[in-house]
Amino acid sequence: VALEGKLRRAVMNREGFFLHYQPKVEAGTGRILGAEALLRWQDGDGEIHSPATFIPALEQTGLIAELGRWILATACAQCRSWQEAGLPPVRMAVNLAAPQFHDPAMAATLESVLAETGLAAGDLELEVTERMLMTDIPGVIRTLGQFREMGIKLALDDFGTGYSSLAYLRQFPMDCLKIDRAFINDLGNGGGALIRAILGLGESLGVETVAEGVEEADQADFLEHHGCRALQGFLFARPLTAEAFGELLADGG
Ligand code: G
Ligand code: G
Ligand code: MN
Ligand code: NA
């Protein structure tokens, strides 16, 4: 309850929220392909909270719509400003919360954020989880199609951890599967077969694959060898401030 009160005030005043950016790199070359925007909140006492702890509260109180727009606008503006600085182009990925995804006004929000910031739709990627897609499937397919028609890229986050039905997967218009880090973690314990299966699935669906939570060189080698296109994880970089990310881009990755 104490957290909720602090949060409400923070959202209303847009206080203490900031974004970190974690690189997604091309397997093999290490070239930076994209950034994932990751929300942080520092409360009045200076404590920094993970979104895992406060996003649920924002969802329950309806505050997520307002903060969600700020997240989108901030991430898109940041991506545009790296472009304007002449840095190598990267795609900006933003995580959507379930109520944002299901918000009928979301398409309009996306249109206005892109128009405001001047970012091309193709430079924005939305990360959604399987769980969000499992209610009202026809509506979900329409929504995904609508975003995609705008030119926005779509990624299925935490892939393999939800109850994704393979039958539906084929109907969801997706550009990218993000293999959950639990699978990467398990690589040392014989988890390689599952990863190969997911990479094969991506290939037959004609979608890109990104591995999350890559922490060791052996994992990166395995993933590259089996055709994973992009890698994300502490091996390459932690989530960085916008400034640090820009410096990394300027150094060529
Ligand atoms: O950033 P990491 O440190 O701890 O993120 C924890 C969880 O919070 C992850 O599941 C991540 O997808 C989610 N998350 C991070 N940033 C955002 C955001 O801007 N919006 C939403 N909805 N979830 C986010
Ligand atoms: O659910 P989502 O994939 O959006 O969550 C991203 C979360 O993963 C962020 O909290 C980020 O800090 C975390 N993360 C990124 N790279 C690594 C990694 O290599 N290892 C671990 N354990 N977590 C990571
Ligand atoms: Mn994500
Ligand atoms: Na994930």
Image: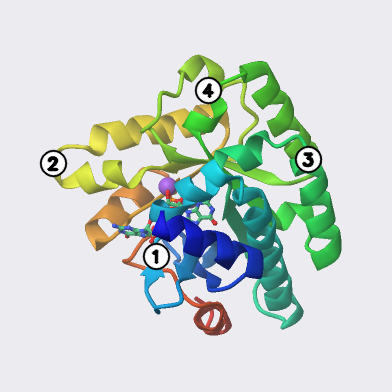
Drawn side of residue 80 relative to residue 75, left or right: right
Residue 134: mark in rendering? 4
| Amino acid type of the residue tagged 3 in the rendering | Ala
Residue, disc 2: 189
Instruction: List x then y, in percent, for residue 59.
Output: 54, 44
Secondary structure under the numbered disc 1 in the rendered image: strand
Secondary structure under the numbered disc 4 in the rendered image: loop
Give the Cα distance between marks 3 and 1: 28 Å
Residue 105: mark in rendering? 3
Q: Which class describes the residues within 10 Å of circle 2: few (<14), some (14-19), or many (20+)?
A: few
Residue, disc 1: 49
**Residue for point 49% across, 31% down:** 130
Q: Along the polypeptide, which appears first: circle 3 or circle 1?
A: 1
Closer to viewer: mark 4 or mark 3 = 3
Q: Along the polypeptide, which appears first: circle 4 or circle 3?
A: 3
Q: Which class describes the residues within 10 Å of circle 4: few (<14), some (14-19), or many (20+)?
A: some
Q: How many marks?
A: 4
**Residue for point 41% across, 59% down:** 2
